[in-house]
Amino acid sequence: MGSHHRLRDEEEQVAALARDALPALITGGAGDDPAGVLTYTMVGASTGLSQLWLLILSTPMLVAANSMAARIALTAKLG
């Protein structure tokens, strides 16, 4: 009986995580319009891996911006 209860708790945690992550996934996918994909493809084809170092700089900035936006939304109680 204990393992069944623990399994149910884990399922609820996974469901809560999915519920919280869904808006971020939708927002992330919304920025990938056909013109953007074409631009990303052309830049990638012309520069190769030479600008991959920008990923190291841009990822922490993206995390910080998303974190601040989420905190503002929680404080303001607006989506």
Image (spheres, helix red, strand yellow):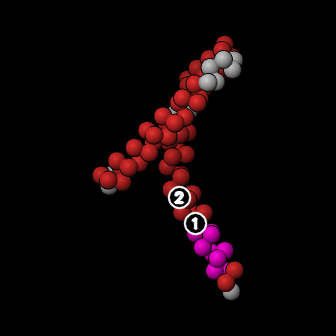
Q: Identify which amino acid the numbered label 2 is placed on.
A: Arg
Q: Secondary structure at mark 2?
A: helix
78 or 62, nearer to the observer: 62
- Image-quadrant location for residue 74: bottom left
15 or 2, nearer to the observer: 2
74 or 29, nearer to the observer: 74
In the rendered image, residue 29, in percent from the top left (x then y), is placed at 55, 39
- Residue of label 1: 13
- Image-quadrant location for residue 41: top right
- The answer to whether residue 59 shows anywhere in this view is yes
Q: Label for residue 27?
A: none
Please tell me whether residue 9 belongs to the stretch shown in magenta: yes
Q: Where is 7 relative to 51, above or below?
A: below
| Distance CA(mark 2)–CA(mark 1) | 10 Å
Residue drawn at point x = 64 percent, y = 24 percent: 52
Q: Which residues are magenta?
A: 4-13
